[in-house]
Amino acid sequence: MAIPREEYKERITNKMVLTEKEINYLAGFIDGDGSIYAKIAQAKDRKFKYAIRVEISLTQKSSRRWFLEKWQKKLGCGKLNYAEESPKKTVDNLIIGQMGKVRELLFLLKNNLMIKKGQAKDAIVLIDKYYKRKNMTLEDFCSVCSLADKITAQNDSIKAENFVTGASVIKELRENNPLK
């Protein structure tokens, strides 16, 4: 018995259940007022002394915070925060940062994204590689750092100076390999 397309999409994930309409809407929302990015941060307890996270951010005027709250509840994840872009303009962001949830959401949306489809596919690859980090070689980790830079570079508003770059991590690791 064939499974109808909408029901199949719901079965791909046992956690996040979105209708076809919601998938289409959310993909358009992320393409327009969202970001997919990768962050690299120091983590002394990690094998290569750095940790990588992939996040999805949805932005709305603060007067429409209710809309982000609706999506937070529907998705079952994410944190809401307030940002002042200028003295007269405030926005709220819904940030989804749990790697499993990010992967799950991007997997559901990737075929419906238009502008950020490449970013979504790269982010899924990065997350899959990063989940295997216990067995990762230095070159594998450097490859993931390069992918993090590629994902973040495709955003219009996120400035590279706000993050540790993959290129700087790669340079440091190759000069001072922590596994020596």
Image (cartoon, rainbow, N blue to C red):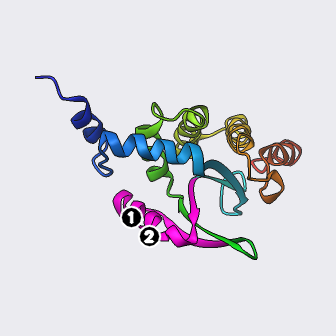
Q: Residue at 69% of width from left, 37% of height from top?
A: 147
Q: Is residue 65 visible?
A: yes
Mark 1: secondary structure? helix
In the image, residue 93 sits, relative to residue 88, either above or below, namely above
Q: Position of residue 28 (x, y in %)?
A: 50, 42
Between residue 142 and residue 102, name the one nearer to us. Answer: 102
Which residue has dot 2 on it?
A: 66
Magenta-highlighted residues: 56-83
Left or right: 122, with 74 as reference point: right
Q: Mark yes or no: residue 34 visible.
A: no
**What is the number of the mark on residue 70?**
1
Residue at x 36%, y 46% (from the top left corner): 22
Instruction: Say few, some or many: other residues with alpha carbon within 10 Å of mark 2 (under 14 / 14 to 19 / 20 or more).
Output: few
Residue 63 belongs to magenta span? yes
- Residue 120 image point, x, y percent: 55, 38
As helix, strand or loop, the secondary structure at mark 2 comes to helix
- Tell which of 65 and 7 is nearer to you: 65
Report the residue that reaches farthest toward the top. Answer: 1
Specify whether residue 147 is painted magenta.
Answer: no
